[in-house]
Image (tube, rainbow, N blue to C red):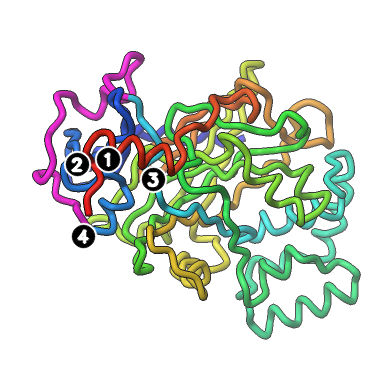
């Protein structure tokens, strides 16, 4: 077991500009963070989507609040920290790393049964021979590997999106449904095989331009998706099953897509039973460059309010938690910490989806709230 680096909760680079959302007691308020100061931007943008679309990235255009950003993470914070997105569509790219591709095939061939996973894993790794790691998706080499695996009866729809020309891009959840730092994150109470998915998340403006990055947890129910890929919606889109935060770090001279391409993401899961799982995901091992995933997400689709895109994860836990051969699955109360030196640390605690605080602030409720506060502009 490797030791996971402990990163600061928020990026302390004085030059970094961060976008976030807080609730001061009246409803969601978009803020900018610069060098520890928190700036209320609601006078020029009622939502984070509007902040991004207008490129309103100058803290001096807002009002500095009477507390530093560290106070938001204190035991008794002056405001509640929310997910840093609101009206943006929540998209995700799946099977973007070789290891996770193999694990998805294992789920499928084990029919979602963790007791069969070990046997399937051994057979599949023998058939692949490790060659999938060096395959460029959509290449002639990929076509040759596909033909060989079909001949051995080992081909899968997951390998199609892992090394074929088209990436898997799906909608993780509705706009306004993500939870932020410190919130409970949910797994279904009828799932018995599941895990966190620590990922880099890109924030993309309505014109298709990536403007920044943050951290996310694209919770995965391995038993549901393993039974059938057509259960992806039930496996992925549930109450509190999408965490994003703590802030979006905007791209600038000091932080760019090149930093995303080289990012290392750490993961620590700590259970109330004393269990600890450490893992990591290296963006250097991704099969498709993030810019290509953005291009495929755009495809023939407009996103007038912008979107965020989970880039996928290398992390696929096989370490046994309880019963030998069954691998990892969450228990209620697990603390999940996802970190990156440039983006901070996203912290959430696991509960059941139907026990998490109900999602009540949808788009209609937000519009009513903003109208009541005089924050809607023509």
Find the distance from the CA under tag 3 to the CA under tag 1: 9 Å
Disc 1 to disc 2: CB gap under 8 Å: yes
Disc 3 to disc 4: CB gap under 8 Å: no
Which residue does the image show at 68% across and 81% down from the upper left?
Answer: 141
**How many numbered marks, from 0 up?**
4
Q: Which residue is mark 3?
A: 85
| Residue 354, image quadrant | top right
Find the distance from the CA under tag 2 to the CA under tag 3: 14 Å
Image quarter (top left, top right, bottom left or bottom right) of the C terminus: bottom left
| 72 horizontally vs 235: left or right | left
Q: Can see residue 125? A: yes
| 121 horizontally vs 312: left or right | right
Q: Can see residue 258? A: no
Which residue does the image show at 14% across and 44% down from the upper left?
Answer: 59
Find the distance from the CA under tag 1 to the CA under tag 2: 6 Å
Q: Residue furthest left?
A: 60
Magenta-drawn segment:
55-79
Q: Residues within 10 Å of mark 3 (few under 14, many from 20)?
A: many
* Image location (x, y in percent) of residue 101: 69, 59
Q: Residues within 10 Å of mark 2 (few under 14, many from 20)?
A: many
Q: Which residue is mark 1?
A: 30
Find the distance from the CA under tag 1 to the CA under tag 4: 23 Å
* Image location (x, y in percent) of residue 177: 50, 41
Image quarter (top left, top right, bottom left or bottom right) of the N terminus: top right
Disc with the residue nearer the chain's start (3 vs 1): 1
Q: Which residue is mark 2?
A: 41
Disc with the residue nearer the chain's start (4 vs 2): 2
Disc 2 to disc 3: CB gap under 8 Å: no
Q: Which residue is mark 4?
A: 253
């Amino acid at each position: 077991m490797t030791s996971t680096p402990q990163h600061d909760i928020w990026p302390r680079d004085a030059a970094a500009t961060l976008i976030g959302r807080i609730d001061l007691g009246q409803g969601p308020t978009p803020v900018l963070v610069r060098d520890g100061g928190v700036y209320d931007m609601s006078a020029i943008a009622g939502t984070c989507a509007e902040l991004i679309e207008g490129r309103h990235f100058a803290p001096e255009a807002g009002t500095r609040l009477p507390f530093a950003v560290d106070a938001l993470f204190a035991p008794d914070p002056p405001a509640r920290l929310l997910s840093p997105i609101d009206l943006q569509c929540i998209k995700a790219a799946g099977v973007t790393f070789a290891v996770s591709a193999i694990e998805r095939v294992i789920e499928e061939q084990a029919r979602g049964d963790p007791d069969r996973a070990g046997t399937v894993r051994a057979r599949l790794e023998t058939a692949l021979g490790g060659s999938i790691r060096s395959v460029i998706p959509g290449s002639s080499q990929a076509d040759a590997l596909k033909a060989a695996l079909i001949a051995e009866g080992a081909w899968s729809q997951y390998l199609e999106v892992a090394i074929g020309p088209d990436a898997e891009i799906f909608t993780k959840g509705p706009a306004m449904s993500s939870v932020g730092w410190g919130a409970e994150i949910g797994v279904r109470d009828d799932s018995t095989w599941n895990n966190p998915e620590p990922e880099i998340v890109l924030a993309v403006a309505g014109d298709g331009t990536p403007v920044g990055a943050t951290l996310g947890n694209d919770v995965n129910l391995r038993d549901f998706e393993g039974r059938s890929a057509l259960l992806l919606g039930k496996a992925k889109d549930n109450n509190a099953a999408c965490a994003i935060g703590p802030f979006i770090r905007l791209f600038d001279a000091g932080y760019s897509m090149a930093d995303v391409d080289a990012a290392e993401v750490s993961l620590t899961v700590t259970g109330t039973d004393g269990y600890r799982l450490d893992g990591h995901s290296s963006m250097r091992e991704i099969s498709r460059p993030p810019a290509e995933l953005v291009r495929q997400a755009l495809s023939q689709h407009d996103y007038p309010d912008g979107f965020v895109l989970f880039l996928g994860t290398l992390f696929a836990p096989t370490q046994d938690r309880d019963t030998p051969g069954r691998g990892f699955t969450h228990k209620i109360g697990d603390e999940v910490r996802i970190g990156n030196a440039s983006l901070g640390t996203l912290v959430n605690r696991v509960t059941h989806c139907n026990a998490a605080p109900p999602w009540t602030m949808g788009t209609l409720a937000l519009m009513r709230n903003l109208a009541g506060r005089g924050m809607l502009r023509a």
